[in-house]
Image (cartoon, rainbow, N blue to C red):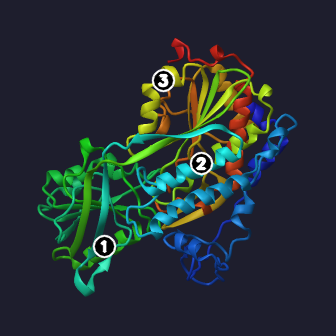
């Protein structure tokens, strides 16, 4: 594949352009939008969209020699179409992006309505509104048998309300980014007022000689792409704090800015004491207060949490649609519908991509579509995945004649870099993780499609199906590419950093995979025993 890529002159030019980056020295302070740090240059023009300003306000962005030299959305490098791929020109990234904006507006309404635990969360009215949006779009595209199959939501943890502050009363400094760990216990109604103690990364050596009994332990955690994976989890800091009889734990997420972030914690390893994740700015404010208190005890912190440990009785649904083909063999396109927070990359990008592919294939005569395409919106991939659980339970009926399952999820995000204590955005598209379970033929089809549209991936695919594909990836040949950038499951996952160029790239690659899969018999796509 490498030889194939580098022999194309246009490919070499694009790679060369991506790496031509200007170095920078000055930083500026802006009053609105992302927080530009420093002085000495003119800030960029403020965005007139106040909602956009609100969403961007918690980000810290490094700006070089003044204002950006281009509009980010318009500046991403687009892969040129070859004669063999020109037919996919109708799949337009700006059109897909318009759907991303519509879907994320549903989640934003959840916050506007006053929900502290917000997003397109399974079992809520915003989950139902997303289902209804998808059904309307599929019907408008000409997809047949569009329906919603109602399902029970498994009992889920629910955060009703909370607050975390340094101090109390009129002098309290509220830590607005505080977000409880899933499955963390509630406090008493009046909350807790606790002395704080800082334990670094939360390793055994960090706890040595420290008395944390009955106190609020503060841990600094280094994030990895995806944020749900961070050093506190690797080093076991929360569990160690509990073993040492801490009364609460505050984990500072070391991602520049002040993002709220959702951290999933299985009930089997759920925190035994109230546990919150803090954004970096709030965490620094708390750690600075601890520094100032030395050599005495740490400052008092007030925290309160009202949570329902097993909320039950909620309903959700699988959204189905069918585009009949020339045969009753099937190709499944699926997309998870739920999100925490705005959920632009995860997973408005995937829903929008699936709808756009429905529109594209509805314009192709049925006789030219070898296989029937089944579209499925799956609920609750962050909360038990009841939809794919049902599909797996009925796999013989659902996937008995399936050539491939493609999971449209985490389609794209802007390539972002950590630059000291700042974030630095580029006009490049992030490299994708990928999952593929099937034959060498299916793998060849996918890799060629990635190359045709410049979709970069890690050299080695993941071993197991992730996300919504996790329960069903062995039920039929399956695959997906997915972005796991730093803003996954944070309030930083917003449409501004889901590029239309990346949406276009991903959707076109999936369309080519569908067409190439339709050129071969189903038996050629099945994973052989030697590959398992």
**Mark closer to the observer (2, 3):** 2
Q: Tell me the SS state at disc 2.
A: helix
Disc 1/disc 3 C-alpha distance (Å): 51 Å
| Residue 173 coordinates in the image, percent (x, y) | 31, 80
Marker disc for residue 286:
1
| Residue 140 coordinates in the image, percent (x, y) | 70, 47
Left or right: 419 with respect to 42? Answer: left
Please report the residue visible at 48 percent of the width from the left and 71 percent of the height from the top. 58
Q: Which residue is mark 2?
A: 134
Q: Which residue is mark 3?
A: 395
Left or right: 509 with respect to 128? Answer: right
Please report the residue visible at 73 percent of the width from the left and 26 percent of the height from the top. 516
| Residue 455 coordinates in the image, percent (x, y) | 68, 42
Q: Residue furthest bottom?
A: 170
Q: Dot 3, how many residues are within 10 Å of its Cα: few (below 14), some (14-19), or many (20+)?
A: some
Q: Are marks 1 and 3 in contact (CB under 8 Å)?
A: no
User: 473 or 156: which is nearer to us?
Assistant: 156
Mark positioned earlier in the residue sequence (2 or 3): 2
Q: Are marks 2 and 3 in contact (CB under 8 Å)?
A: no
Please report the residue visible at 72 percent of the width from the left and 43 percent of the height from the top. 359
Left or right: 182 with respect to 127? Answer: left
Quarter occupied by residue 1:
top right
Above/below status of 260 relative to 11: below
User: 447 or 221: which is nearer to us?
Assistant: 447
């Amino acid at each position: 594949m490498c030889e194939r890529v580098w022999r194309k002159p246009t490919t070499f030019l694009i790679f060369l352009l991506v790496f031509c980056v200007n170095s920078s020295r000055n930083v500026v302070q802006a009053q609105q939008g992302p927080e530009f740090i420093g002085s000495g240059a003119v800030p960029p023009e403020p965005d007139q969209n106040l909602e956009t300003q609100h969403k961007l306000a918690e980000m810290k962005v490094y700006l070089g020699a003044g204002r950006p030299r281009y509009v980010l959305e318009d500046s991403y490098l687009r892969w040129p179409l070859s004669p063999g791929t020109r037919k996919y020109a109708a799949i337009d990234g700006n059109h897909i992006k318009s759907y991303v904006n519509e879907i994320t507006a549903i989640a934003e309404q959840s916050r506007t309505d006053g929900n502290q635990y917000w997003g397109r969360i399974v079992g809520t009215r915003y989950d139902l509104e997303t289902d209804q949006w998808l059904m309307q779009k599929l019907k408008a595209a000409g997809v047949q048998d569009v329906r919603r199959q109602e399902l029970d939501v498994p009992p889920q943890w629910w955060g009703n309300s909370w607050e975390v502050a340094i101090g109390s009363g009129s002098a309290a400094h509220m830590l607005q980014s505080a977000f409880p760990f899933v499955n963390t216990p509630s406090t008493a109604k009046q909350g807790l007022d606790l002395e704080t103690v800082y334990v670094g990364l939360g390793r055994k050596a960090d706890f040595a000689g420290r008395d944390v009994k009955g106190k609020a332990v503060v841990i600094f955690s280094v994030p990895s792409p995806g944020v749900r994976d961070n050093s506190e989890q690797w080093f076991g800091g929360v569990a160690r704090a509990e073993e040492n009889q801490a009364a609460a734990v505050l984990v500072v997420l070391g991602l520049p800015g002040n993002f709220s972030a959702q951290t999933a914690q299985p009930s089997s390893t759920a925190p035994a004491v109230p546990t919150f994740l803090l954004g970096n700015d709030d965490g620094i404010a708390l750690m600075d207060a601890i520094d100032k208190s030395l050599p005495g005890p740490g400052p008092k912190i007030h925290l309160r949490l009202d949570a329902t440990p097993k909320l039950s009785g909620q309903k959700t649904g699988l959204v189905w649609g069918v585009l009949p083909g020339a045969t009753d063999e099937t190709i499944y396109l699926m997309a998870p519908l739920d999100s925490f927070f705005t959920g632009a990359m995860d997973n408005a990008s995937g829903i929008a991509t699936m709808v756009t592919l429905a529109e594209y294939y509805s314009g192709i005569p049925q006789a030219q579509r070898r296989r029937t395409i089944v579209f499925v919106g799956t609920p609750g991939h962050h909360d038990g995945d009841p939809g794919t659980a049902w599909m797996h339970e009925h796999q013989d009926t659902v996937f008995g004649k399936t050539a491939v399952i493609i999971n449209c999820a985490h389609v794209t995000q802007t390539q972002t870099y950590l630059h000291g204590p700042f974030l630095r955005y580029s006009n490049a598209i992030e490299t994708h993780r990928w999952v593929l379970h099937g034959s060498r033929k299916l793998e060849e089809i996918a890799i060629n499609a990635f190359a045709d549209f410049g979709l970069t991936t890690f050299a080695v695919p993941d071993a197991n199906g992730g996300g919504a594909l996790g329960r069903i990836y062995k039920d039929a040949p399956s695959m997906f590419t997915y972005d796991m950038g730093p803003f996954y499951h944070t309030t930083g996952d917003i449409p501004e950093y889901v590029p239309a160029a990346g949406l276009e790239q991903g959707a076109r690659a999936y369309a080519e995979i569908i067409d190439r899969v339709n050129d071969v018999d189903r038996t050629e796509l099945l994973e052989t025993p030697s590959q398992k």
